[in-house]
Amino acid sequence: MHLVYYDESGDDGFPSYASPIFALSAIYCPALDWRENFEIIAEFKRQIAKDFNLPVKLEIHTRELLLNKKPYAPLQLRDADRLEIVSRFCQVAAQLSLRSITTAVIKPWIRKSDYAVLDRALSYSINRIETDLRSSSANRFVIITDEGRVAKMRTTTRRMQKINYVPSQFYQGSYAREIRHLIEDPLPKDSKESYFIQLADMNAFLFYALAAHQTGVAALPRRAPAGLDHAFVSGCLSTLQPILNLKASAGHPHGLVLIPSCP
């Protein structure tokens, strides 16, 4: 069995929205490797606590950390320190026994007024996880996410287990393929209590920044440190390459799934 952790960057509103991109990242970890992965991240948290005087129990929320917002601002970390923490987290994540998929909804490309952003992003993600795990003996999976998204995600996953249409790679149109390996409804967990949701949060922010640069529909906040540029984001994602499911989007070097597929 696999444990699948989700987090996002940007809001899922549409047609009214606060952010033009919604990036949803999944971290899926084999249950048998969960403890070893957990201990590696825990050691990383202890090390950065020593190196940067960062409280070991403080959640790593990447956007707030890099933009020096609460609760990080009172710690008076230098810009270089905050960038270094994220860079090290990427290096640690690349060593873990898990995989990651990110889907990004580019809202200015949407042409339907009733487009359900979270539903679409989650549907694409689950279909790719199901495909990736199909040949594995541990192909069952359960979803864990922040409580605020559970109700919407439950609606999507229940529908996909009954009715699920997947675009065909060989002809124009779709075919029915119900999700069969998902166990239970999505389960809630506070991100403060989960290293894996925090890792999904980091991936979501980095892919949001990448999608913003590549599509030109958004820019990083003005208070972003000077070092938080496209080169830094690309370097982080290159470091994460060993855990990225590159087959999720064959046309993208980091496997990022952009939806809709074109403007």
Image (cartoon, helix red, strand yellow):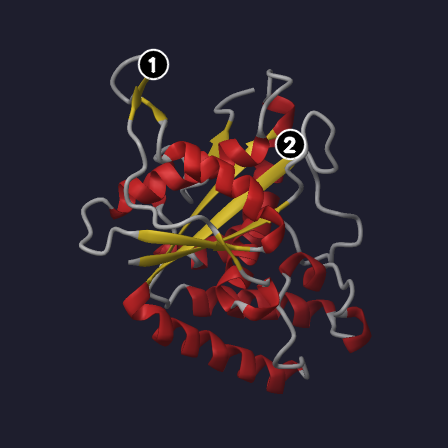
- Disc sitting over residue 159 in the figure: none
Q: Is residue 230 visible?
A: no
- Disc sitting over residue 216 in the figure: 2
The C terminus lies in which quarter of the figure? top right
Residue sitting at x 51%, y 21%: 262
Residue 2, compared with residue 211, is above or below; it is: below
- Locate residue 123: give its quadrant: top left
Mark 1 closeness class: few <14, some 14–19, many ≥20 residues within 10 Å: few
> Residue 127 location in percent, x, y?
36, 37
Q: For mark 1, what is the residue? A: 173
Left-right relation of 186 to 15: left
Q: Mark 2 or mark 1, which has the lower sequence index?
A: 1
The N terminus lies in which quarter of the figure? bottom left
Q: Amino acid at mark 2?
A: Gly
Secondary element under disc 1, as helix, strand or loop, is loop
Residue 183, compared with residue 11, is above or below; it is: below
Residue 111, compared with residue 235, is above or below; it is: above
- Locate residue 107: give its quadrant: top right
Q: Amino acid at mark 1?
A: Gly
> Residue 67 location in percent, x, y?
74, 59
> Residue 114 location in percent, x, y?
62, 20
Q: Is residue 237 visible?
A: yes
Residue sitting at x 29%, y 45%: 181
Residue 4, compared with residue 110, is above or below; it is: below
